[in-house]
Image (cartoon, rainbow, N blue to C red):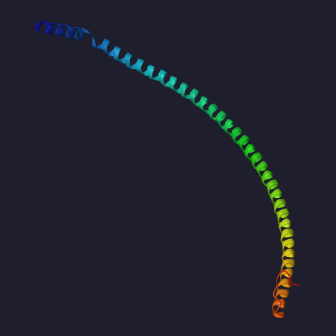
Amino acid sequence: MKVRNLFFAAAMGMFACVPASVLAQTVGQDVKNAGHDTADASKKVANKTATGTKTAVKDTGHGTKVAADKTAAGTKTVAHDTAHGTSVAAHKTEQGTKTVAHDTAHGTEVAAHKTGDAGKTVGRDTVHGTKKAVHTIDGKPESDTNPPR
């Protein structure tokens, strides 16, 4: 342990022998160098910030233009598709209207024909019923040899 203390004392003695003016000059130079290093670092950061800002502005402008172009193209596509869909819907509506009109006319014609047939059937059945009633009233029952009139 004594040897260790001896080396420590010798090392401390060396610093004690250094003149104070030399130490002051070294500290002042270190502070001056630190100031220059700080200034250089600040310039580098400012330059990199300016370059990054210019790049960001350029990229933002380009991205905005691309977005605007794609929005315009999408709008045109939507307008075209909407116009086409409207045209198709109008055409199909027209075709549907024609089909409904045709089917309605045909249904009306069939109904009128069936109504006429029903009237004839009612008339025949009425005549037959009347004859049957007359035969029953006259006392002549209907048979194969005595058909209704």
Q: Is residue 68 above or below residue 17?
A: below
Quadrant hosting residue 57: top right
Q: Position of residue 26 (x, y in %)?
A: 34, 14
Relative to 65, does residue 81 appear above or below in the rendering?
below
Name the residue at the bottom extreme: 138
Quadrant placement of the C terminus: bottom right
Report the residue at 62% width, 35% height from top: 60
Residue that appears at 76% across and 50% down: 85
Percent x, y of residue 136: 81, 90
Residue at screen point 51% across, 23% down = 44
The N terminus appears in which quarter of the rendering?
top left
Q: Residue at x 32, y 16 (%)?
A: 24
Looking at this view, is 106 or 58 the one in front? 106
The residue lying toward the viewer, choosing from 104 and 4, is: 104
Measured along the vertical axis of the image, is residue 43 above or below residue 2? below
User: Given the current orientation, which residue lies at the most extreme front position?
Assistant: 145
Q: Is residue 66 shown left or right of residue 120? A: left
Image quarter of residue 13: top left
Residue 37 rendering spot, x and y as whole percentages: 44, 20
Which corner quadrant of the image does residue 128 belong to? bottom right
